[in-house]
Each structure stands twice: as C-alpha cells, then as structure tokens.
Amino acid sequence: MMRKLFVAGNWKMNLDEADATALAGDLRANLSGDQVFAKVDVAVYPPFVYLPAVGKVLSNSKIQVGAQNVYFESRGAFTGEISVAMLKDVGCRYSIIGHSERRHVMGEDDVLINKKMHAILQGGLEVIFCLGELLSDREQGQTEKVVERQLRNGLMAVEPADMSRVTIAYEPVWAIGTGKTATPGQAQEAHAFCREIIADMFDESVAQQVRIQYGGSVKPENASELLGQKDVDGALVGGASLKSDSFTGIIKAGLNL
Ligand code: PGA
C-alpha cells in the first residue's frame, strides 16, 4: 500500500511572533505549486500563542497547522490548559500528544496520553501520537517492550475507524535534539514493529494504512534515506524545521523518492 508522506515541523518553545509568521510566509512561498502537496502532506506546529497569527499567514494554503499539546477536558477550572474545541476554533487540524518532552520533562504518563487521544478523536481533530524509547531502554534491549507498552496504552479503546485520524511518530528519545539520528535500518525496524502491534490491536488493513513518521535529528542530509524506508511514512522535525531552507529541503527529499 502506498501511504502519502507526511512531513511536519514541531517548533517547540522557539521563535517570537515576528519570526514565526516570517517562517510561515517563507514556507508558503517556497512550497507554492501543487507538485509538492500531491506527494507530501505538510504541517507546522507553532507554540499555542502564535497559532492564530501563523494560521492567518497559511490560510488557503496547503500547509496545515496543528498544536503541540492539548488537554482532555472540554472546559472548566484547568488553569493554563487548552481544549480541543479551542484548537479547532483557531484553525488547527492536528494536535501532537505524547511527545517525549511532555512525557519526560512534564511527567505525562500513558493514562493521560490516552485521555488526550480520546478527547481529540471525539472532538474531530487528528492526532499525532509520539512514542519512543530512552537510550537506557535501547541499551538494555527494552526498545520493543517500551514501544509496545506506549502503543497499547496510548491507543487503548480507540475505534478502528478512528485510526484514519491517527498518525504515529516514532521518536527515539536519544535522537531528539541530539544530532544523533537512528540509522535508516533502526528506524525501519522500529516502524515495522509498530505496524505489527497495530495489526494485532486492530487488523492488517489498519496497520497498512496508518502513517508512521520518524522523528529525531532529521535533516536535509539524512531525510531521503530515512524517508526511503518501506515503513517510514514521513518525518516529525524539530530543530531543522525552524529554518525555511532546511525544512523545505527535508520535504523535497521526500519528492525525489
Ligand atoms: P529534532 O526534534 O528534530 O530537533 O530532533 C524532533 C522532535 O522532537 O519532534
């Protein structure tokens, strides 16, 4: 099955409003023309407070906008949190959940991530569900065990029909922001394993249609080899998405496959 590539930029807690809107404008200009979007879906995830401004720059373009996080409750006394409806209101199509920085810096666990999963799906948005092992997990031969636990817990009680609105992002924690990239072989192996677990949880057709992005120090120089792997369906890009040229370079790497 041919899955369309999906390359997204996670801006994390970077940029100010002027830089964020300028970057969005440059991307829009660099990617104009249908050729790119016929082969690659493209999205950016700015900080919450810049979503409206970035959304405005990208309105009526094919570059989609998403959020880096969301809370599962719909309204009420949850100081500092943002609901799915609020994200929809400012034009988001996606929200990331389970990013390693949320898991390991903010202490989010699988139970919370599963609640967010259900809130997003019920609210009609699409999910970017991140998971991946720590360096210590890999060194102890625990990669598959950790990835399987994160998948089964994060996707618990999700309806098969809703899986068309879920993208998985396999991001080995040791490769995020470190300049160390998983080898194409390591990425392929982990992605194929994720697909096996999804086939077991749902069925083979769900496993074949779900897109699995790789994340962790993706750059223009390593993108085509990673994106060329059979089970790698795109990239979730942090650092290299903060510059229009490098992010565009990664997207274009996907075009030449
Ligand atoms: P990186 O981040 O590309 O800077 O390693 C990836 C991510 O955290 O999504």
Image (cartoon, rainbow, N blue to C red):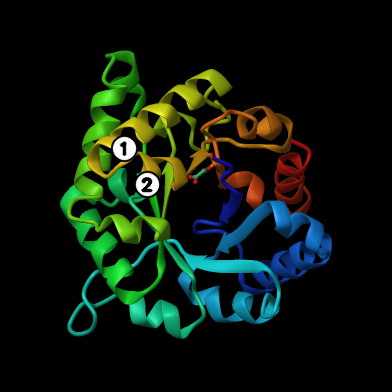
Label placed on residue 206? 2
Q: Which residue is tagged 1? A: 199
Which residue type does callout 1 highlight?
Answer: Ala
Name the spot of residue 211 as percent of width and height, x first: 48, 46
Relative vertical location of residue 6 with respect to residue 132 in this rendering, above or below: below
Along the viewing direction, whichever of 67 and 179 lies nearer the viewer: 67
Dot 2 and dot 1 residues touching (CB under 8 Å): yes
Name the spot of residue 47 as percent of width and height, x first: 50, 67
Name the spot of residue 15 as percent of width and height, x first: 61, 63
CA neighbours of label 2 inside 10 A, class few (<14), some (14 to 19), many (20+): some
Along the viewing direction, whichever of 102 and 168 lies nearer the viewer: 168
The image quadrant where one finds the N terminus is: top right
- Locate residue 55 relative to residue 130 in the image: left or right: right
Relative vertical location of residue 33 with respect to residue 228 in this rendering, above or below: below
Which residue is rendered at x = 31% and y = 37% of the image? 199
Is label 2 in a helix, a strand or a loop? helix
Is label 1 in a helix, a strand or a loop? helix
Relative vertical location of residue 118 with respect to residue 252 in this rendering, above or below: below
Along the viewing direction, whichever of 237 and 17 lies nearer the viewer: 237
Along the viewing direction, whichever of 239 and 166 lies nearer the viewer: 166
Whether residue 193 is visible here, answered yes or no, is yes
**From mark 2 to mark 1, how far is it between C-alphas?**
7 Å
Which residue is rendered at x = 76% and y = 67% of the image? 28
Whether residue 31 is visible here, answered yes or no, is no
Q: Quadrant of residue 166?
A: bottom left
Name the spot of residue 191 as percent of width and height, x first: 44, 31
Which residue is rendered at x = 31% and y = 67% of the image? 121
- Locate residue 65 relative to residue 164 in the image: left or right: right
Q: Quadrant of residue 71?
A: bottom left
Q: Which of marks 2 and 1 is nearer the N terminus?
A: 1
Farthest residue, direction top: 140
Relative vertical location of residue 23 with respect to residue 239 in this rendering, above or below: below
